[in-house]
Amino acid sequence: MKLSSLVRSILLVVTALGPLAASAAPLRVVTTTEDLASLAREVGGDHVAVESIARGYQDPHFVEAKPSFILKLNRAELLIVVGRDLEIGWLPPLIQQSRNPKIQPGAAGYLDASEGARVLDMPTAQVTRAMGDVHPQGNPHYWLDPANGRRIAQAIQRKLAAIRPADASYFAARYADFDQRLAAAEKRWDAAMAPFKGTKVVTYHRSWSNLVDRFGLDVIGFVEPRPGIPPSPAHTFALMQEMKRAGVKVLLVEPYFDLKTPNSIARETGAKVVVLPPSTGGVPQAGSYLALFDHIVGLLSGALAGAR
Ligand SMILES: [Zn+2]
């Protein structure tokens, strides 16, 4: 090949790569929680730049809206939300003020991750926000079953492929790899939790419905009288009687709740308080969606074994 035709070939290749190179800027994704951010990174790899609004150690029902969130949303090409009213107290004004038509609810750059997930605790009677119940659309903590993590990752894969069709096979390969690693980890988690099927526990907030359903634990009560309603003396007294009757030895508390009531319940009933992070990033060891379950299963199986 003559040098001039070689140069022409290289130029042709470079020209052909031009549009690809232009679209290779990472897709800007904003998620409401770090769990969704971790799943988006698993599927999106280096073709996405993902930022979460809430931190994993925060109560996702109550996030303080900051002006910097509006800027993030203004630049986003995709917004992924947990849905089921989890973010209703803080997200809608941020989306509106972002003035970004791409990420408004119903637009192509908006993904409600609950749509393909298995959601528990669907209300049988009408529940209104006026009752103070923060779970009126079913349990929004549904990411706490790894089977739902898979469903969320799949929904993210489809959405990313729709926005960036040229990268569809890349996202599909990333999803397949995540799916395999998740399946291997699920075997490990199911085996570690198998000895504790049917164990009765109490939890502070109703965060763990999907987790206990997955691993066969039995939640007999909650420190909150209703999701989002702080404990009252009468409810706490009745709960302690019930815990003594049922022989409950473990009380799970999310890290953002005051330990005063849980500690006094523990003193009175002999149960052990276990502070368990329900979100990726809740503690440094739970830095990814998979690491979160490693951490939860390790803490929980250890506490349940110790309580026997
Ligand atoms: Zn909740």
Image: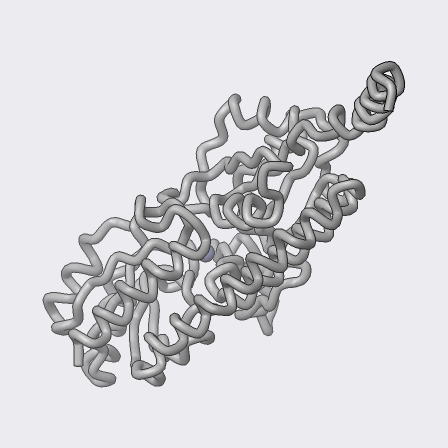
Q: Position of residue 34 (x, y in %)?
A: 47, 44
**Residue 187 shows in the view:** yes
In the image: residue 125, left or right of residue 283:
right
Where does residue 219 sit, x and y in percent of width and height?
36, 75
Q: Pinpoint residue 96: horizontal percent, then vertical percent.
A: 67, 30
Q: Is residue 269 left or right of residue 221?
A: left
Quarter of the image where the C terminus is located = bottom left
As rendered, which of 252 and 190 lies closer to the eye? 190
User: In this picture, is 177 found above or below 101?
Assistant: below
Report the number of numbered marks.
Answer: 0
Res 108 seen here: no
Q: Quadrant of the N terminus?
A: top right
Residue displayed at 58% across by 69% down = 122
Q: How is the image coloured?
A: one colour
Residue 115 sits in which quadrant? Answer: bottom right
Pick the residue in front: 25 or 103.
Answer: 25
The spot of residue 108 in percent (x, y) is 78, 41
Compared with 243, 291 (above or below) is above
- Left or right of 127 on screen, residue 167: right
* In the image, farthest residue toward the front: 1
State which image quarter holds ligand 1.
Answer: bottom left
Which residue is pictured at 53% across the width and 53% down the height? Answer: 130
Q: Where, by quadrant of the figure, is residue 21 drawn?
A: top right
Foreground of the two, 192 or 276 = 192
Q: Residue at x 58, y 33 (%)?
A: 49
Residue shown at 44%/57% (left/top)? 290
